[in-house]
Image (cartoon, rainbow, N blue to C red):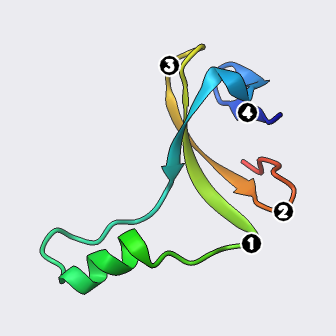
C-alpha cells in the first residue's frame, strides 16, 4: 500500500486518491503527427523516477504533481 504525500493533508493512504497519469509535455497543436505519435505511443520506459498527477478525491479534492521512484515506489517530492 502506498502512502501518498498530499500537499494540503499530509501523507494519506492510496485508497483516498485517483491516479491522473504521467506528467508529460505535449507538443504544440501545429506540430507534425510524428511528434504527437512519439509523445502518445512511444514513451520511454524509465526505470528510475517519473512525474505523475494525483487527485485527492477523499480529502481536499486537489490535483498535484509528484515525483515517484519506480524501483522503491517512494515519493520524492
Q: Is residue 45 left or right of residue 31?
A: right
How many residues crowd around disc 4 within 10 Å: few (fewer than 14), some, or many (20 or more)? some
The relative height of residue 38 versus residue 47 in the rendered view (above or below) is below
- On residue 21, the disc is none
Q: Nearer the viewer, mark 3 or mark 2?
A: 2
Q: Is residue 40 left or right of residue 20?
A: left
Q: Are marks 1 and 4 in contact (CB under 8 Å)?
A: no
The relative height of residue 59 versus residue 77 in the rendered view (above or below) is above
- On residue 47, the disc is 1
**Sequence order check: which comes first, mark 2 or mark 1?**
1
Q: Quadrant of residue 14?
A: top right
Looking at the image, which residue is at 33% across and 66% down? 26
Looking at the image, which residue is at 81% across and 51% down? 73
Residue 70 lies, in percent from the top left, at 76, 60
Label 4 – label 3 distance at C-alpha? 14 Å
Residue 66 lies, in percent from the top left, at 63, 47
Disc 2 target residue:
71
Q: Are marks 1 and 3 in contact (CB under 8 Å)?
A: no
**Sequence order check: which comes first, mark 1 or mark 4?**
4
**Sequence order check: which comes first, mark 2 or mark 4?**
4
User: Foreground residue, 45 or 7?
Assistant: 45
Disc 4 target residue:
5
- Mark 4 lies on a secondary structure that is strand
Label 2 – label 4 distance at C-alpha? 18 Å
Label 3 – label 2 distance at C-alpha? 28 Å
- Mark 1 lies on a secondary structure that is loop
How many residues crowd around disc 2 within 10 Å: few (fewer than 14), some, or many (20 or more)? few
- Mark 3 lies on a secondary structure that is loop
Label 1 – label 3 distance at C-alpha? 30 Å
The outermost residue toward the front is: 41
Amino acid at each position: 500500500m502506498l502512502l501518498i504525500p498530499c500537499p494540503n493533508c499530509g501523507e494519506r493512504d492510496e485508497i483516498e486518491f485517483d491516479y491522473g497519469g504521467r506528467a508529460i509535455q505535449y507538443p504544440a497543436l501545429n506540430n507534425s503527427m510524428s511528434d504527437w505519435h512519439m509523445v502518445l505511443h512511444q514513451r520511454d520506459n524509465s526505470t528510475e523516477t517519473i512525474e505523475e498527477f494525483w487527485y485527492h478525491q477523499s480529502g481536499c479534492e486537489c490535483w498535484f504533481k509528484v515525483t515517484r521512484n519506480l524501483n522503491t515506489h517512494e515519493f520524492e517530492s
